[in-house]
Amino acid sequence: MVGRLGVEDMSDQNARGGRDGRGTRLVTPGALLGASEGRRIGHGVVENEGQLIAVKLGALIENEDEVSILPSYTRYTPRPGDLIIGVVEAVQSNLWFLDINAPFNALLPMSLGPGKAEFGGARNVLNVGNTVLCRIQEVDETHSSVVTMKGLGLRRIDSGIVEEIPPHLMQSLFSDNNVLKSLKSSTDCRIILADNGRMWVDGDSNSMSNVISKLEQIRSMSRDFSSLDSMVEILQTEVH
Amino acid sequence: MGGYGDVQMIDDNGIRVDGRTAGEIRPVSINAGIIPVADGSAEVIWGTNHVIAAVYGPMEAHPRKIQKQDRAVLDVRYNMAPFSTTDRIRPGFNRRSREISKVTAEALESVVLTELYPRSKIRVEIEVITAEAGTRCAGITAASVALADAGIPMTDMVISVASGKINGVVVCDLNKEEDNYGEADLPMGVCANSGELVFLQMDGDLSPEEFQIAWDYNMEAIAPVHEMMIDALKRSNGGDE
């Protein structure tokens, strides 16, 4: 029987690791990672009969006594407190269903919505296709999540565009705040990076197209671990 | 001698109709990440077989009646393209494709950590573009690579190989003629690292001794195919060689 240590939360946000893709040892599911004695089990690793086993495809990270895997690809897994960008997919009398780029849609109850609405008037406040900036309020054990728009800066998004970044790259590319700062300054855009792999970009059309082209390049290289440095460089490069 | 019409498929020196020895598998080539819109994908070219697998999810399981409250379900669909064989195959599901979809799902459920995604569905599409023989084995192998490529947590990767009997001789990895006119077929799915058996079928009769030889051939064929799977995943993810 395989031990379940270390797999309680498989969200990619838990994967730690530097962004240096050079010399990265890529491991595949089932790869034996040595004895478990004296080592802590991190993301993407399980223990079975004293042996550590990789359960995800990704880069092996050995930090001091912890062994973890930086996955090459994962979907977004919501966690309470995450700032996310959601798109309204369905409306009921007193709640909205949001697509949050996760396996399951999130619920936005009217009590946590953006404004007052009569029962049955939810559509007048937020309609299908509207985009909102919100936070994950709670996630239950079956991965159903409730989001809130009560909080500083949480609002309906009426301008700019929403672009996508592969969720597994969020930690590697933006763990250093300077990367996002450089992107904002180099493109002269207002940018909000959400934890669910979405990015709100607002500015003049030339600036926005610069960001779009940078993100397109990132997406095209997203599966290549050896390109992490190049991706950071693309994000930080000044556009003329 | 053996099968239908006593077709001679192996000579006195143990050389088969396609020039292989008894324990030799056909040339195999594996590529991962071939479908950009899928969460994970893989292509397996095994002899003349050409199989593509794509994985989508985990996603909300629909219809709701298929949801499991404590784990994800693997929704596997094996399909042969109408042009994949010399006789046109009627499009859509049939008894054989349903059976192969079911056994493939059961083999893969042994290694996928489905309990991490309650109420979800992981969709695995296996499409046979060209069929020679052993498409279910190529399909399971391709699906295994595609699941790994999609970042689905798995305790191991499954590799499937078949051995069989032609003219009274046990041989590994039957080709089309050997499959059609042979006397037995033993496809197996094995976890690459642990060596656990997750899938076994047998068509025809094998004596205990012949079964053991076929088993050994299959087990021997696992390692080189596993190497190719790892190599394919590394190539598509920019890892070290």
Image (cartoon, rainbow, N blue to C red):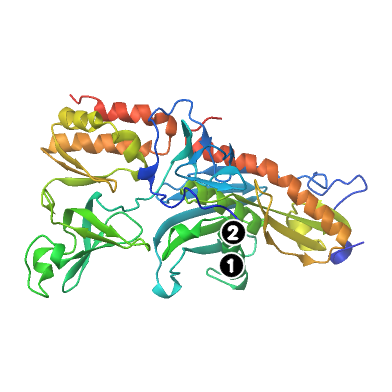
Q: Residues within 10 Å of mark 2 (few under 14, many from 20)?
A: some
- Subunit of label 1: B
Q: Residue at x 30, y 52 (%)?
A: A79
Q: Residue furthest front?
A: A38
Instruction: Kindly report the distance in space between the C-alpha atoms of the residues bearing marks 1 and 2.
Output: 13 Å
Callout in the foreground (1, 2): 2
- Subunit of label 2: B
Q: Residue at x 68, y 41 (%)?
A: B224
The dot on residue B102 is: 1
| Residue type of the residue flagged with mark 1 | Lys
> As rendered, which of A53 and B237 lies closer to the eye?
A53
Q: Residue at x 46, y 49 (%)?
A: B150
B213 relative to A189, above or below: below
Check disc 1 and report its element: helix, strand or loop: helix
B21 relative to B2, above or below: above
Check disc 2 and report its element: helix, strand or loop: loop
